Image (cartoon, rainbow, N blue to C red):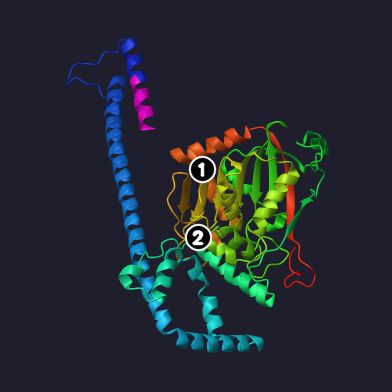
Amino acid sequence: MVSDWRERAGVISRGLAELDLREPAAGSWDMSSPTWGLANARVRLEEATDCAGHLREALIESAERYGASERVVEALWRIGAGPLAALAGGMVRVAFPSILLGGGVALGVVLGARALGWVTPLDAWLADQTHLLSDRGFVRAVRNAVDSVDELVAGALLVPPGLAVGVGAEIRAPEAASLALGIAGLFGATIGSRVLVEAPVRVSRRVSDGPADQSAAARATRADAPPVDGPVTAPSGVADLVDRIPTSDDGAQIRVERYGEADDPRWVVYISGTADFTTTAGAETNDMTSNLHGIADDSPLDALRMAGADSGAVERAVRMALAEAGARPGDPLLPVGHSGGGIVAATLAADPELNVVAAVSVGGPVASAEVRGGVPVLTVEHEEDLVPATGGSGHPSLDRLTVSRSVLEPGVEHDAFAAHALVRYQETAALIDASEEQRLVAFRERVAAFTGGGAGEMTRWVATRELSPSTPGAARGR
């Protein structure tokens, strides 16, 4: 702004020179003349420019110092988390009988009280502490705890403290999820439990509630492709991508959009977040069982999973929906997901058999997800959101761009997962579109080039697990 004013002052000055309004000699200024006013304005603008320059330098220096301080604090958290986890592991081993007995008695008392309809002091205390789940310090502690599972195990095995720290550096969120699924699979095979045990899925197209543009069916990529819900405009930025992620009110968990010509289709798939937070697999695919299968890696621990599926229900449903919508192997793809849907978006991006050009995860625990070279993955996390923290800190990658910010006002009471709400991530996505940060600009340009900016065609899909009537949890679902 100041530079513009200086430029205008220069233009006016040259105009006065052309009119031959010469500047008087030093000491003979006429303060009422336009020449004097112009000269005075130019001096003040020069001063303002200098002040703005100093302010800019100070702001840059402050930002750099703030960033350095944040990195130091984060490093201290990580340095301290390892030894504390190793110490905790040793204490757990030594006091395991007491912990098991005391925990069993406490659990029995709580369950008995609840069966009688009583509110225990523990229930009351937990109800008053839900705000801790969205506390930035607690979220950071959870993230570091996930990264320190290896030290905890090493401490429990009585590995010397000096060796316990970092001894199992490969035990991260994917490995821990595989271990949990392996144990669940063993129990499932033994007692018939469906806790964390997957099942086949099916998808069906959800027809629009209102009249659809059925003429678009003739423009489908295959003759046997289902009719589309109707035409749709191409997303213009990250905000549009996040706005189109399905919610529980949409009646469908998956939205597929096709752009480009019939002989060169490009696909965008939007995946909704977790709808069922229980651990027993039911008809609803977007649940914790699918999430854990999505996070788990293909480690040797996978042999213990015995889950009847090598991927989560949501991922399999997304692949089926894309195929039903007309996507063919090798077609360019851009997956976008929230929460558990973000896990699927990151998983698809890492699949070398898919032609994924980019991916977006908002509020997903994907920090430890594999990143394929050349496929940019934009992850958006809120500092008070506990869900992304359950994925740990992960590993740095040039292809992973993480955007984070604080969204909850300090001192104001919020719901436990207020920072995880999709509407708050929509607000953050709008700020991303307004940013001039070079990498964010490049990502938005990639999205725009991918869709081509023209009209597309959209279908919505409902995913359901196929459970027999006698299967535990089969009565639950949509």
452 relative to 62, above or below: above
User: Is residue 105 shown in magenta?
Assistant: no
Residue 175: where, in percent of width, then height? Answer: 51, 62
Magenta part of the chain: 1-10
The amino acid pointed to by label 1 is Pro
Magenta part mainly helix, strand or loop?
helix
Give me the disc on residue 257: none
The residue that appears at 66% across and 73% down in the rendered structure is 188
Q: Is residue 290 visible?
A: yes
Image vertical order of residue 222 relative to residue 303, above or below: above
Q: Which residue is mark 2?
A: 391
Q: Amino acid at mark 2?
A: Gly
Quick one: label 2 or label 1, which is nearer the N terminus?
1
Q: Is residue 351 left or right of residue 439?
A: right
- Do labels 2 and 1 touch, CB within 8 Å? no
Mark 1: give few (<14), some (14-19) or many (20+) Cα within 10 Å.
many
Label 2: how many residues lie within 10 Å, few (<14), some (14-19) or many (20+)?
many
